[in-house]
Amino acid sequence: MNLRLMVALAGSVIISLQTWQTIIAQNPGSAPPRGKNGNAQETKPDPPKRDTPHQHRSEGVPLQTIDRHAPEKSQRPDPSESPLIDSARSESEGVRLAVDLVVLDAQVIQQKTGRVAGNLKKEDFRLAEDGVVQQVTHFSQDTLPLSVILLVDRGGCLDPFSAKVRNATMEALNRLRPQDEVALMAFANHTELVEGFGRGKSRIVAGLDNLPPHDEEAQHCFNRALYQAADYMRQAGNPDGRRVIIVISTLTAFFDCAGTSPEEARMAILESGSVVCGIIPKTAGQQIENGIMRAAAGIGGMFKAKSTKLEQLAEETGGEVLIDKPELLDRTFNDLIDHLRTRYTLGFVSTNKKRDGSFRKLKIELANPPAKLEDRLVVKTKRGYIAAKESVITGRPSR
C-alpha cells in the first residue's frame, strides 16, 4: 500500500470515528466541521435561503461570486419557444388556470449493454400516476436543449478533480450543443457559484481554472450543495426534465451538514425538475474512503443520523451515477451526455384535477417488453412530481 493510499485510509477512519462521535453527541442530521486539531467546531446553521447559493469558500469567509461572464437575458433560451410547455398559459391577470400539462423525460437503455434504445413510439410506453393510467398526449425524442450545472466537490481527503477528470469534463463540454446552457458550482462546507448559466464552453473553461482549492479539512456537504444547485436551477431557461445537476466527487454518500434538512434538499430538486447524476473517479483510495463512508452512513441511519446518497436521488429523478477510472472518464462522461441527450419526452394532462401541491407518484414502463431476458430494456425517469397549488396567477401555476 503506497503512502497516498495509507493517508487516504487513515483519513477515512478518522472521518468514520468522528461520525460516531457526531451520532452520539449531536442531534440527528448535523455534522459539524472539523478544526485543524480534529475537534468539532461550533457552527451556525445556514438559513434556508431561496435566492442565491452561498458564496463562501471557507467557513465564515464570504467571497464575491466568480462570474466574470454573466450571460445577457437574450442569450438564454426562451421556454416558450419549446414545442412542449409544462402548463397552460394565460395572457391576463386573475385567470384561474384549469389544465396542466405534465412533462417528463424518460431514458430507455438495454439492461445488458447499457446502450440507449432509440426508435420507440408513443404506443410503446405505459404511464401511470398514483396507479391510474394516463393518456400520453405529447411525445418526442431529442428535441429540447439541456441546462447543466456542474457541481464539483472540493472537500475531503481526496481531490476528485484531477487533470484527467478535468480533461474528461472538457471532452463532455465539447458534446454540448450551441443551445445548451451550463453553470459551474463548487462545494465543500459551503456552495459557491463559479460561473452562472450561459452558452459557450469558454466561460466554463475559465471557471475550471479558477475552482476553489481542495480543502482536506472541509466536509462533503451534499445536502447543502444540492439544495443550492436546485435553487439556482430556477434560473435555467430550459424546461423541466432537461435540467441536469452533475456531481463530481469521490463519495456517493455523506452525513448531512446543519442548515438544510434532507427533505428540503429533496423537495428543492423535485420542484426544480432536475435530474441528478454523478461522476465518480475510481481509485484505490477512493474506494476505501467511499466504502467506509457508505458503511458509516448505513450504521448511522440506525441511530437516525441523516445522510444524502447520490444513488437514491439519481434513481428518484431518473439520473445515474457512473464510476470509472480517471483515465477512462472521458468515455464515461461522454456516455452520460449521450444518455441525457437521447431521452424521450412524454406529456400528459393528469386525470387528478386537484390543485393541492401534493407529491404524485409516476411510473413509466414498456407496454410490450421484450420476451428475451437478454433484450430487456430499462426505463429510467423521475418517480414523481409536485402538483400545482390552487391560486389565481398570471402565467404558470405556483408550484
Image: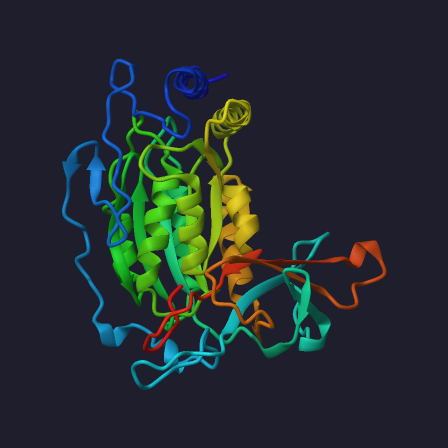
Figure disc tally? 0
Q: Is residue 168 visible?
A: no
Residue for point 66% across, 67% down: 127
Residue for point 37% across, 83% down: 90
Horizontal side of 153 relative to 137 (left or right) equals: left
Q: Where does the image place residue 149, in percent across and percent down from the top left?
A: 37, 55
Name the residue at the bottom extreme. 91
Horizontal side of 344 relative to 175 (left or right) equals: right
Above or below, 50 against 73 in this view is above
Q: Where does the image place residue 361, in percent across and percent down from the top left?
A: 59, 57
Q: How is the image coloured?
A: rainbow
Q: Where does the image place residue 342, in percent across and percent down from the top left?
A: 56, 67
Residue for point 70% across, 53% down: 113
Name the residue at the right extreme. 371
Q: Is residue 205 visible?
A: yes
Question: Where's the C terminus, which quadrant?
Answer: bottom left
Horizontal side of 264 relative to 113 (left or right) equals: left
Above or below, 342 against 206 in this view is below
Q: Quadrant of residue 105?
A: bottom right
Q: Where does the image place residue 320, in percent across and percent down from the top left?
A: 55, 50
Residue for point 30% across, 49% down: 185
